[in-house]
Image (spheres, rainbow, N blue to C red):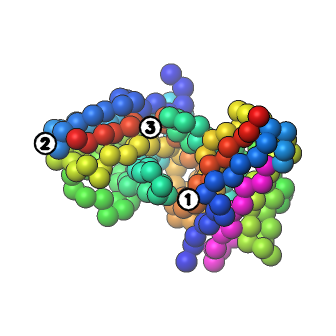
Amino acid sequence: ETGVTQTPRHLVMGMTNKKSLKCEQHLGHNAMYWYKQSAKKPLELMFVYNFKEQTENNSVPSRFSPECPNSSHLFLHLHTLQPEDSALYLCASSQDLTSGSYEQYFGPGTRLTVT
Amino acid sequence: AQSVTQLGSHVSVSEGALVLLRCNYSSSVPPYLFWYVQYPNQGLQLLLKYTSAATLVKGINGFEAEFKKSETSFHLTKPSAHMSDAAEYFCALKTRKLIFGQGTELSVKP
């Protein structure tokens, strides 16, 4: 596997379910990100991790819970979601937050539908 | 405040025609700017980046962008559109984090 991978690619869940999204990067990066992409809206940054430490929580509801066990893996735990949470969830990585290499590399996304 | 504005949510061109996607930015510090492309059901792919070196930046797939400080613009161009260029394009500004524009959907007519 190369680049940034995300699983599952598609997820349908009820409002009372608990599920997790997984992201893995094979680029040797130290910063990882979760974005939400809804139709007709700009990308919304949700969380940022740098060297496994959370550096940003962009006022995300607590029903979204991130976890970064190491620099290569990032999870997004979901529970009691709402229909408006249906969106494409994108994971990205970059070298880190301070090295000057600013470009982010994105995974293919998980298409989440909340019923 | 830092911001990115993409003019036109949808642009349609004929195959072989010039592609011009507009991006304007607002930044209180020298900007780092990016263009990303998103094909259907995929993530974002970096097309090119401006990081204060040459003002004309060449990217992948024949795209290029010119940084114009006086106009606070970073428009994306390609001389001749191909059907495979149909996608959504995002301009982004790096501050403490990446700020994305709303996106421009490019359609290419045969």
- Looking at the rendered structure, the kind of residue marked 1 is Gln
Residue A64 is a magenta residue: no
Q: Quadrant of residue A61?
A: bottom left
Question: Circle 2 marks a residue in which chain?
Answer: A
Disc assigned to residue A109: 3
Give the quarter of the figure containing the C terminus of chain B: top right
Q: Nearer the viewer, residue B84 or B100?
A: B84
Q: Quadrant of residue B17?
A: top right
Question: Circle 3 marks a residue in which chain?
Answer: A
Sort mark 3 into few (<14), some (14-19) or many (20+) by Cα contacts within 10 Å: many
Q: Is residue A101 above or below residue B33?
A: above
Find residue B38 and report its horizontal and vertical position in percent: 58, 41
Residue identifier under label 2: A16
Disc assigned to residue A104: none
Find the residue positioned furthest to the front: B110
Give the quarter of the figure containing the N terminus of chain B: bottom right
- Looking at the rendered structure, the kind of residue marked 3 is Gly
Asked if residue B35 can be seen in this view, the reply is no
Question: Circle 1 marks a residue in which chain?
Answer: B
Residue lying at 85% horizontally and 39% vertically, measured from the top left: B16
Q: CA distance from mark 1 to mark 2?
A: 32 Å
Specify start and end residues of the magenta stretch as a single range.
B19-32
